[in-house]
Amino acid sequence: NGIRVFDPAFLNTAAISSKITFIDGDKGFLMHRGYPIEQLAEKSDFLETAYLLIYGELPSKSQSEIWKFEVMHHTEIADDLAKVIGSMRYGLPPPPVPSAYDSHPMSVFISAFAAMGAFAPEANPALQGRNLYIQDKAIMNKNIIRIIGKSATVAAASMRVRMNRPFIAPRSDMSFAENMLYMMDATSDAENYKPDPRLAEALETLFILHADHEMNCSTATMTHVGSSLVDPYSAVAAAAAALYGPLHGGANEAVIRMIERIGTVDKVPAFLSAVKAKKELLFGFGHRVYRNTDPRSKIIRQVAETVFAACGHEPLIEVATALKDAALADPWFVEKKLYPNVDYWSGLIYRSLGFPLDFFPVLFAVPRVAGWLAHWKQAIEAPNPKIWRPRQIYVGEKVRDYVPVEERE
Ligand code: CMC
């Protein structure tokens, strides 16, 4: 109608109507396809939740078995892709210590997904008619299954290359989280290696909590990029790049770097003063939608206890708790309605599990692939889908004449 609404950073723009996820930010409530996150975290597993997000209903027993079998049998990656990943090393080989390659695993994850499109010829965007994925659901489903299955393998490989260690082939006879722990961790006795069931369960819960969160920055990116009908591997690479940023999925790494920098409980007041003076950000706090405690952070705090019991006390917990308590009691944070978000505690869990700090955002990316695909599928299947193309308000120069370089001042 010609009327343009100026809404920088999409503070108030709904770009889709969706049946996938609902958040009540004032109440701190989250549900997927109608199921509250607390119930899914307690009773479901990651692959079942992924199915729910993508296909709209919890799978029947046989649907669940077929789905899990299919995903776990699409976890292998091509040898050439493994070579691409293995080549992504920054640092002078041989590194100063055997585990000191500095390539950020998230850069490797992003690049691996971009490269993966090259190994999926049927996903080539040039082949896509307007409704390719609609006409051929088998192609859509095959790519969904491949992307979820391979996400864990690519993630584990990104950590192994970071640690300068050989890749470990996936195990289709394990659960999603067990297999991921296995690929990251199995050492000499791979055949008999069995991940600690408490840790596999904790990771499974963390993956459920991270699987989707409606129109966050990376899911909006997936939907935006996907609206050009590019292949879903390239769209996942773009979404992963959005997630990498410290205001989004990179926050779990930034939280730990912040707490390490604070160091001791007595330094907490000075740090909060710096936050209030806008010299620092309190990572792991605040959210565009939640103006109350993020329900996922409550569940994560419980998972943390399980992991600490299995892996030993996490020394940074005292500083993290003191920082959280001080912020929640401070009127500056109360007035701005800043509460802990999902990233506040998750980093402490990953640290306790012994993962390298820069690997934490990858642990966010793997499960979020399910949410990206759910939104991608929903958008592709929507009636009359359109390419995303926001408008702008032009505030630049009025029209003027070109000045030859010799005549410019
Ligand atoms: N530390 C200090 N000040 C903050 C923070 C924070 N973490 N979050 C918001 N504020 C301030 C902000 O400066 C603004 O102040 P003012 O009114 O004086 O301008 C006010 O609170 C309102 O915040 P906002 O910037 O309008 O909030 P937003 O919706 O644009 O940003 C956010 C949301 C998550 C990017 C932001 O809260 C933030 O930077 N948090 C820290 C990074 C973080 O933890 N990210 C993870 C988000 S949750 C999981 C995920 O999506 O990945």
Image (tube, rainbow, N blue to C red):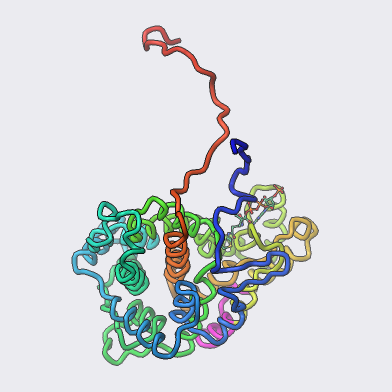
Where is residue 14, by image quadrant? bottom right
Q: Which residues are the magenta region?
A: 303-317
Q: Residue at x 51, y 83 (%)?
A: 202
The answer to whether 393 is drawn above or below residue 378 in the figure is above
Where is residue 336, by image quadrant? bottom right
Q: Residue at x 34, y 56 (%)?
A: 234
Q: Residue at x 36, y 90 (%)?
A: 194
Q: Position of residue 169 (x, y in %)?
A: 26, 78
Outermost residue to the bottom: 192
Whether residue 98 is visible, yes or no, is: no
Question: Front-most of 402 and 64?
Answer: 64
Outermost residue to the right: 331
Q: Is residue 109 left or right of residue 117?
A: right
Q: Position of residue 313 (x, y in %)?
A: 56, 82
Whether residue 161 is visible, yes or no, is: yes
Outermost residue to the left: 80
Q: Is residue 397 left or right of residue 298?
A: left
Q: Is residue 98 left or right of residue 59?
A: left
User: Which quarter of the rendered picture does the C terminus lie within?
Assistant: top left
Q: Is residue 308 left or right of residue 23?
A: left
Question: Front-most of 371 and 189?
Answer: 371
* 310 drawn magenta: yes
Ligand 1 in which quarter:
bottom right
Question: Front-most of 310 and 234?
Answer: 234
